[in-house]
Image (cartoon, grey):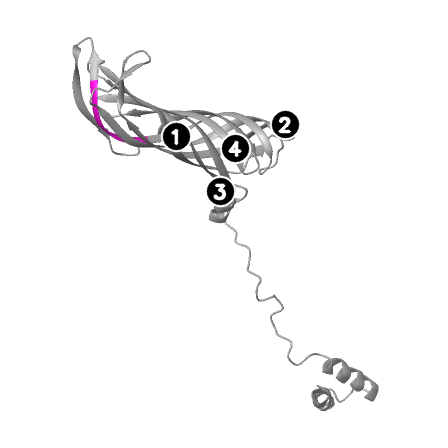
Amino acid sequence: MLERYHIALVVTVLSVLFLSPNLSPAQLTRSAENAATIPVDTPRNTVPPDTEPQKTGFWAWVWNSLTDEAHVTVGYGILESSLTVKRKSDGASATMVQRDTSAIFLSYSTASSFFKDSNFGYTFMVNYVDFDMGQQEIHHNEYADLGTEIKGHMIYAVPTLFYQWGEHRYQGKFVRLGVGAGVGAATYSGTIQLTGSQVPGGEKIYTSKKSYEPRLALSDFLEARWHHFGISISYAAPRIYGDGYEAKVSNFSANIGYTYYF
């Protein structure tokens, strides 16, 4: 290292003598010493190699909004679903139900935001539900197996407004009551038995909805959480319109779940 310093000093002095003949010996010495103190192996790029530039733009903002302090909850509990189908031509209708069925639940929510220092806040929730309805309502709150069955899926995405008791931390302890309105969609297929004034004996038909056409969905929920564990009760009901029929799917669930925070 000392030899490299001497070589650099000599080279610098000679360069200065040829390029700056009007400088005094003292000035030449100071210039040479200053130049020689520059490390030979100093890299040109002073940015640490492991530092990555921060991503900006619209999609980066969307990704950060969907992941920062967002969470996914996996739960197990009870599901009750119903599907009411009404034929537009004569008003004949049928209601299929799935009652007290155990199921696995999966839901996603963005980070919660509060209005200043109040207990009111808002979030965005996405839920997905499978249903398999094997009973039909024959009278109010009376159900029977008529040999009909409807199977399908429902998904709804709802911005919700809530009131919260407890900590305002996303991994805290709190109780939350909320309502929301957003979009929902459902697909289903199967058989139902329509009844009405023009079909007093009943008419069994096949019905289906294959496309996830978004419709207005209303939702409300009650949630109590202790850090990662919680209890959730929710209800959602999107309306669906088809060729010659209109339908309403409703879903009520109560489950105990574990929440994973991003």
The amino acid on which the numbered mark 3 sits, given as a three-letter code, is Leu
Earlier-in-chain disc, 1 versus 3 = 3
Quadrant containing the N terminus in the rendered view = bottom right
Secondary element at image label 3 = helix
- Label 3 with label 4: CB-CB less than 8 Å: no
The amino acid on which the numbered mark 1 sits, given as a three-letter code, is Val
Q: Which residue is mark 1?
A: 183
Q: Which mark is residue 66?
A: 3
Q: Residue at x 48, y 29 (%)?
A: 232
- Where is residue 84 drawn, in percent x and y? 29, 20
Q: Which residue is mark 2?
A: 118
Label 4 or label 2, whichever lies nearer to me, is 4
Disc 3 to disc 2, C-alpha distance? 23 Å
- Looking at the rendering, the stretch of residues picked out in magenta corresponds to 186-193
Q: Which residue is mark 4?
A: 230
User: Along the horizontal axis of the image, is 56 left or right of 192?
Assistant: right
Tell me the quarter of the picture where residue 185 sits. Answer: top left
Disc 1 to disc 2, C-alpha distance? 27 Å
Q: For the stretch drawn in magenta, what is the main secondary structure? A: strand
